[in-house]
Image: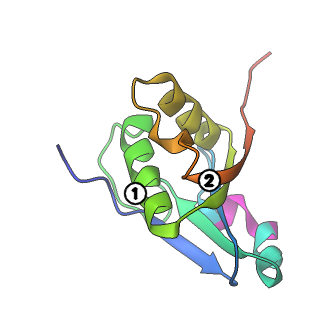
Amino acid sequence: MDEPAALHLEQYGEGRPAVFVHGTFSWGVDGFPQQVALADTARIILVDRVGFGETPGEPPFGWHQDAPALVATLRSVGPARLVAQRCGARIVEFDRSTHSPQLTEPDRFNALLREVWRDG
């Protein structure tokens, strides 16, 4: 099995971590510019998913690359608040629907906020 991609992280502040996972048409700091201001109260970690921003990757991009990379990132960060939007949220949802939902194990995060894009 291949090693998961090493995700590029922009980190600000100290304290209890909050990991932000962007949607499709952005990357970490582009997708969450206002959250940097929260660094005076928490450790803000903005993730660049595989093939976005500063994280390289080979197409096709998708949850099959992002989910293991996010699991590895959360393992290195420790318990965190996980905030995911649009396709970033779908990565968490797809991982939950597999036989091995590693992103939603209780020791991975202590809060999950997600916004899933729904057409219609």
- Residue 42 colored in magenta in the image: no
Q: Quadrant of residue 65?
A: top left
Which residue is found at the position 17% from the left and 43% from the top?
Answer: 1
How crowded pointer 1 is (Cα within 10 Å; few <14, some 14-19, many 20+) is rated as some
Q: Quadrant of residue 93?
A: top right
107 relative to 102, above or below: below
Q: Main secondary structure of the magenta part?
A: helix
Span shown in magenta: 29-34
Q: Is residue 32 visible?
A: yes
For this orientation, the residue located farthest to the front is 107
Task: Please state which of residues 62 and 1 is positioned toward the viewer in this rendering.
Answer: 1
* Residue 82 image label: none
Which residue, given by chain and number where applicable, does mark 1 sit on? 72
Which residue, given by chain and number where applicable, does mark 2 sit on? 109
Which residue is found at the position 48% from the left and 56% from the top?
Answer: 52
Q: Please identify the quadrant where the C terminus is shown.
A: top right
Name the kind of residue labelled 2 in the image: Phe
Which residue is found at the position 53% from the left and 37% from the top?
Answer: 91
Which residue is found at the position 68% from the left and 38% from the top?
Answer: 86
Going from the N terminus, do you reach mark 2 or mark 1 first? 1
For this orientation, the residue located farthest to the top is 120
